[in-house]
Amino acid sequence: MMRQYELVERVHKYKPDVNEALLNKAYVYAMQKHGQQKRASGDPYISHPLEVAAILTDMHLDESTIAVALLHDTIEDTSATREEIDRLFGEDIGRLVEGLTKIKKLDLVSKKAKQAENLRKLLLAISDDVRVLLVKLADRLHNMRTLDHMTPEKKARISEETMDIYAPLAGRMGMQDMREELEELSFRHLNPEAHDTITKRLQDLSDRNADLVRKIEGELTELLVANGLDKAAVKGRQKKAYSVFRKMQSKSLSFEQLSDVYGFRVVVDQVPECYKALGIVHMRWRVVPGRFKDYISTPKQNDYQSIHTTIVGPARQRIELQIRTRRMHDIAEYGIAAHTLYKDGYTPQPGEAAKGQSNAYSWLRLTIESLAEGDNPEEFLEHTKLELFQDQVFCFTPKGKLIALPRGATPIDFAYAVHTNIGDTCVGAKINGRIMPLVTRLANGDEVEIIRSGVQVPPAAWEEIVVTGKARSAIRRATRLAIRKQYAGLGQRILERTFERAGKVFARDIMRSAVHRLGHKDVEDAIASVGRGELSSLDVLKAVFPDYQDERVTTKVPGEEGWFNVRSAQGMMFKIPEGQKTRIVEEADDEAEAIQPFRGLPDDIEVRFADSGAVPGDRIVGIHDGRKTITVYPIQSPSLQKFDEQPDRWIDIRWDLDEANKSRFMARILVNAINEPGTLATVSQAIATADVNIRTLSMVRVAPDFTEMAIDLEVWDLRQLSHLLAQLKDLDCISTIKRVFD
């Protein structure tokens, strides 16, 4: 366990004017608060914050950050309070310690919606001060190093969380060494069999090729020194097990097929020496085509700068080379932490990032701004994970602005990366001066010009083309708004008809007081819900006019023996079967005038339709269940066959509609449509134009090019339904259409 004087000495080596009093006070306070607490391994608990502090001293961080590392568990696990830490160490340190305490409570591998919300909180916490992130990553690294003493379930949960969130976040912040170690430790616990197998193969390879690595290092060093680069350092390194496993999985390769298990770094003093070293190497050994990248002139978003090339080197081995300056090497190793290394008197060279600036931290802030892009937490989670995991390509606007995008991005992603409005109005793109399809995959260095139209609405199918979370969530939002606008128009027409039949006048203003009783947040949302068939227009009428009564009474039909009405039926009359009479009292002034329906018919008889419905104009019959329900079927219904042997359950029914009080009735149709953008909108528009309401709609893809839609419609009568079917058959996007019966 690190002693107090050892901690001070570690910081003093890179910061001679260290505030020793602050470090000593934090060390003693943490030691006293954690007291006799033990970790799962049995070690004193204080060993954990000391190791976290040691990891941060390796990154050469200031004494305030080291103090936060020593104190980061005190509020969570001891009697310490925020007020006490503020008083002893200042509000700045107290705020950081409290921020880390909140992060510790977050569960980032819980159910998706909760995971997304917790990831929001994590990013918001670290966006205020990057030191929160640095301490949290160091804390996670030490926890992963000591994970062996946890239960298998806890190992799996923590490893999954590390692999999904913290390792990619470290990579995005440019901290490659930390990312590799976090991935390696997570891989060991999540897939121990694969980890052990690959580690053993790598060790065997290392034992066989130790002399070869030293030989290549020696030849490269001699070549560079002979050409005037006396201070150039060459170092070979073997890939980690997880890196090898990931490449084998993504490229479908066996271990023997891997040709780049070893890589070599050339580190020089000045930026011009990087290009000189590149020229020297390329003049000596043949270059592998397509394996050259210059991240010095075009740094990655996390500030990473280096030249990458692959050559066929000594012993005809393929060798990956990274050429960089020492400052670039520090940034590649420590990422945003490296920006504290050169605080005094450092002047960046041409081609190097300016002092104190961090593109990686800028990305983090932009990600926070995108919290408002998604309408729900799952979309934010998808957006952030896409941004964390994707490699990048770099493209330019016509004015030369650099746009970084995930590999595989299209001009649509490019348009949304520039501005959401540009993406929404995009209709085409020029890539390097040539008009190209919007599905074209962009390559490094492409110049992209977006062609726009003021009347464009992004097609829903774009969601399957784009790769960025920002583009995907913007397309979803635009599609939702377009569909809502369409359904709102249909819903308004339905409500106007319903209010007119009730002798009322429909206006949006009169709905405002009732909209919350209908379970919607605004009037437009409620009207669109009526158009979709999710909300009944009659329910809206009753919510706006609570005194309105839609009364139907049960009466005997004068002069027609055996026919009667039922309270729960709309516009239908029922015939009493011969020889099955029994008494039932109806709503009549004189009980003696009550009709005599059939046996077993109770007072509260319920009449309902078969699932596929029936409409006025259909020949209909009823099936009585012997208790309280009559089910109405169209005569064509296949379900009637199962009642062929039960004639006593059949009831004659006829339509008896009141022209002054028409109601809609449900019918089901089956549409086989071409699977292309806009088909659903075309079908919905045709239905709306015919003054027909959609109650429910379900879609199933039956073939790559065709989709089957089952639509429950609400129509006035058979005549209107037949007219609609004829109109739908004429649409180019419809293959077949038919009415279906249960």
Image: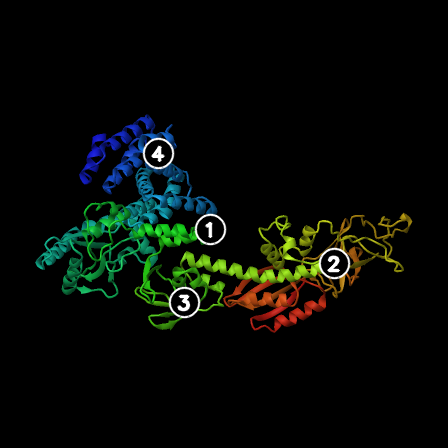
For mark 3, does the 10 Å Cα neighbourhood hold few (<14), some (14 to 19), or many (20 or more) residues?
A: some
Q: In the image, 656: left or right of 268? A: right
Q: Earlier in the sequence, mark 4 or mark 2?
A: 4
- Image height of 91 relative to 500, above or below: above
Say which residue appears at 83% left-offset and 50% top-offset: 599
Q: Nearer the viewer, residue 438 or 572?
A: 438
Where in the figure is residue 515, as x and y percent of width and height?
62, 51
Q: Are marks 4 and 2 in contact (CB under 8 Å)?
A: no
Q: Which mark is residue 439?
A: 3
Residue type at mark 1 is Glu
Does the image show residue 80? yes
* Local SS, label 3: loop
Q: Which residue is mark 4?
A: 73
Instruction: Give the image location of residue 527, x and y in percent.
Output: 61, 57
- Is residue 368 positioned above or below 27 on the image? below
- Contact between marks 4 and 1 (CB within 8 A): the answer is no
Q: Which residue is mark 1?
A: 378
- Mark 1 → mark 2, Cα distance in angstroms: 45 Å
Q: Residue visible at 48% across and 51% down?
A: 376
Decide which of tag 1 and tag 2 comes sooner along the chain.
1
The residues tagged by marks 4 and 1 sit, at their Cα atoms, a distance apart of 30 Å
Q: Give the CA separation, mark 4 to mark 3.
A: 50 Å
* Foreground tag (1 vs 2): 2
The three-letter amino acid code for the residue at tag 3 is Val
317 horizontally vs 33: left or right? left
Along the viewing direction, whichever of 17 and 480 lies nearer the viewer? 17
Residue for badge 2:
503
Q: Secondary structure at mark 4?
A: loop
In this view, the mark in front (4 or 3)? 4
